[in-house]
Image (spheres, grey):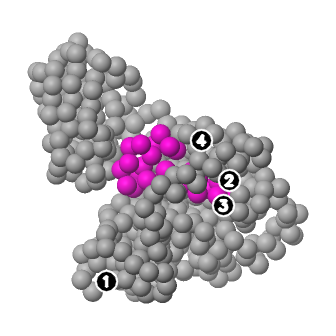
């Protein structure tokens, strides 16, 4: 087990070493949701910065983001290993700090996650905002324990994120399991075999099974506990002690590093549009010989089954402006859809070579469907930078 795990983490460390790194800035911004009686939503933001510290300037670029929901009576500081590692890699990590009492309202917290997601995108055009011109309109909604359940629950109210991920999600009230069919975006769920707070069989597995995601993964990490998806927290640790599942076999560092090993290529693929990162994610998935893994990713979001594209060349991929498609037979029809299934380009042709202008599209992953003159239908993905 140890040998496989060390190989697993080695792969992740190589990818982190090869990526551009930033200093990490931290600041708190309070937003007001006028549609909910001027609800105040403080948000702690970790971001790529020119220097490390509080309220330091953003690095000179725009970045995708993650909105992350905390666990029951847990704080943002519990998740700094994730927020700071990803901020160093060019992500904004936003923690809404609402619903931190012993009587949280799950529906309100789920709605807060959605509100902050939209607010970060809108604030990128606000000259008085700290995030002005620093946000790419591509983000994930995520969370741990209660925050993970609220992540799934949020899809019942709105489904704006490019992708979702959760750590040891706990079932909420209203039920996140009932809400899971509304989650129709890519979804990565982590659980632990040593979790007695929100066990795999009654929380993460039924949510995964119910999810409407077209591409979903469930990773049950052997020896991982509920609380160690974050750093030490008195209340969470007490809950594990009372429930007789303290002192898990897997160390806290190893558990967090396992999550990071998967998350880095997952987010790079869905939020940065790096097509090669999906290969890296698959490599991590394959190299992880100790976890119990389940996936369902054989159908594209628009319902088209993936098939072979032998005899067809699509290049460059990723692309900035033009994509060239060459086939050994004539192409009759070409359709390009985004990850919600919306058709963004469609054309009828009668040629073996087709040029597709993607310069006007937003950065991201698109599904291309090609209908050949012999009736064969082929699909593939292209990445727009």
**What element does badge 3 sit on?**
helix
**What element does badge 4 sit on?**
helix
**What element does badge 1 sit on?**
loop
Q: CA distance from mark 3 to mark 2?
A: 12 Å
Residue at x-position 77% and y-position 60%: 251
- Of the two numbered discs 4 and 1 on the same chain, state the one appearing first in sequence: 1
Q: Which residue is mark 4?
A: 285
Front residue of 301 and 28: 28
Residue at x-position 27% and y-position 31%: 314
The magenta segment is 255-281
Q: Which mark is residue 191?
A: 2
65 lies above or below 95? above
Q: Which residue is mark 3?
A: 256
Q: Which residue is mark 1?
A: 129
**What element does badge 2 sit on?**
strand
Residue at x-position 43% and y-position 33%: 299
């Amino acid at each position: 087990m140890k040998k496989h795990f060390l190989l697993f983490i080695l792969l992740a460390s190589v990818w982190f070493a090869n990526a551009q790194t930033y200093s990490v800035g931290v600041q708190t911004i309070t937003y007001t949701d006028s549609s909910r009686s001027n609800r105040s939503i403080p948000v702690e933001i970790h971001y790529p910065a020119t220097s490390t510290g509080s309220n330091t300037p953003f690095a000179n670029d725009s970045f995708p983001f993650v909105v992350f929901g905390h666990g029951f009576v847990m704080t943002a500081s519990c998740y700094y290993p994730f927020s700071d590692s990803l901020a160093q890699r060019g992500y904004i990590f936003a923690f809404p700090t609402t619903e931190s009492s012993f009587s949280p309202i799950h529906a309100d917290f789920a709605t807060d996650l959605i509100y902050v997601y939209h607010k970060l995108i809108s604030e990128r055009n606000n000259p008085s905002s700290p995030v002005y011109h620093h946000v790419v309109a591509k983000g994930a909604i995520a969370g741990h324990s209660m925050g993970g359940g609220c992540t799934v629950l949020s899809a019942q109210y709105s489904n704006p994120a490019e992708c979702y991920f959760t750590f040891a999600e706990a079932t909420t009230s209203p039920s996140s399991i009932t809400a899971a069919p509304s989650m129709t975006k890519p979804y990565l769920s982590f659980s632990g075999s040593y979790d007695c707070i929100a066990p795999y069989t009654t929380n993460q597995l039924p949510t995964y099974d119910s999810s409407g995601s077209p591409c979903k993964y469930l990773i049950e990490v052997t020896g991982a506990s509920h609380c160690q998806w974050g750093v030490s927290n008195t209340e969470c640790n007490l809950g594990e002690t009372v429930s007789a599942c303290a002192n898990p076999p897997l160390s806290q560092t190893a558990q967090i590093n396992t999550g990071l090993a998967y998350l880095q290529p997952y987010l790079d693929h869905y939020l940065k549009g790096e097509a090669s990162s999906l290969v890296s994610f698959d490599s991590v998935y394959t190299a992880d010989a100790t976890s119990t893994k389940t996936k369902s990713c054989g159908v594209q979001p628009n319902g088209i089954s993936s098939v072979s594209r032998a005899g067809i060349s699509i290049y460059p991929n990723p692309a900035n402006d033009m994509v060239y498609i060459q086939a050994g037979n004539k192409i009759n029809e070409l359709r390009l859809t985004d990850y919600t299934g919306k058709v963004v380009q469609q054309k009828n042709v009668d040629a073996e070579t087709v040029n597709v202008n993607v310069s006007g599209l937003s950065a991201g992953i698109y599904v291309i469907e090609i209908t050949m003159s012999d009736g064969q239908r082929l699909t593939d993905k292209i990445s727009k930078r």
